[in-house]
Structures are given as structure tokens and as C-alpha cells.
Image (cartoon, rainbow, N blue to C red):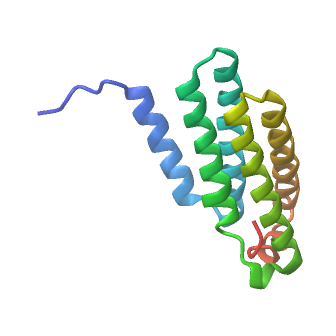
Amino acid sequence: MFGVMNNPAGAYRKAGVETKVETATPHELVIMLYEGALTAIMAAGVQIQEQKITEKGQSIGRAIDIIDGGLKACLDYQAGGEIAERLGALYEYMCNRLLHANLHNDLAALDEVAKLLRELKGAWEEIAADPAVVSRNKAVA
């Protein structure tokens, strides 16, 4: 009647993440995207050191997908104006640095992108403390 769960902890984590995403505000989702990109970059750094080339490529690809397909894709250039334009350019730069890191196993490039993401994430976390600011900044990610 009931199947055996091969990985109950993994299933629980997946359900927890899905629930968190479904109940998160747009602002919280942006912070989650930063966290996901940072996690992927940290994994890639370890994978470079352990010479796990395939896994490194997958982790860097995941970080690029999050930055380009998540953070950059949700920018509203019309409503966000110059701030959105600058963030878009910064996200593009980060993706280029990640491609470089992938091709050259460059830990410094990974660290550079991680530092930029941490700074942006920190700014979003500060904004989260003021709900009035959050509602005004829905157009920029």
C-alpha cells in the first residue's frame, strides 16, 4: 500500500523548501535566490579544490541560472530605472566571471562573485526590516 521512502530526509527538505517558496513574499524570494547562488558558488569552490570537474561545472551552471534566469530576469527596467539597469549590468558581469571561473578553475573569481552577492543580499536583508520600503521596491531585484 505505501512505498518505502529511499530518502525521507531529502523529501522533507524538498517539501520544506517548496512550502517556503509558496509562502514567501517577493522580497523573501529575492533573498532566497541570493542564498541559492551563494550555496552553488561555495560548492563549486570545494569542487575545484577536490578536482571534481563535472560537479564544479554543474554548480557554476546552477549559480549562473539563478543569477541570470532568476535575479536578472525579474528586474523591471521600466519601473526600476537606473537602479535596475545597473543591477542588470552587475548580474551580467557576475555571470561572465563565473564562466571565467569555470573555464580556469579560478577560486578568486568565485570569491569575487560571492562577495558581490553577499553585499547585495545584505542590502535586501536590511530592507526587509522595513515593510514600507519593501512594498516600494517590488520592481527591483
Residue shown at 77%/50% (left/top)? 94
Q: Residue at x 64, y 37 (%)?
A: 40
Q: Outermost residue, left direction?
A: 1
Residue 91: image location, x then y, percent: 76, 57
Q: Residue at x 81, y 77 (%)?
A: 136
Q: Is residue 134 above or below residue 35?
A: below
> Residue 106, position in %: x, y?
77, 30
- Image vertical order of residue 56 relative to residue 63, above or below: above
| Quadrant where the image shows the C terminus | bottom right
In terms of depth relative to the viewer, which is nearer, 87 or 123? 87
The spot of residue 88 in percent (x, y) is: 78, 66
Q: Can you name the residue that lies furthest to the top here? A: 50
Q: Nearer the viewer, residue 133 or 48?
A: 48
Which residue is rendered at x = 73% and y = 35% of the image?
Answer: 101
Q: Quadrant of the N terminus?
A: top left
* Closer-to-camera residue (12/89): 89
Q: Residue furthest front?
A: 103
Q: Nearer the viewer, residue 40 or 97?
A: 97
Query: Is 31 placed left or right of 136 in the picture?
Result: left
Left or right relative to 62: residue 107: right
Compared to residue 121, the image places residue 49 above or below, namely above
Q: Residue 138 appears at what percent x and percent y?
A: 74, 74
106 up-or-down from 117: above or below: above
Q: Is residue 106 left or right of residue 119?
A: left
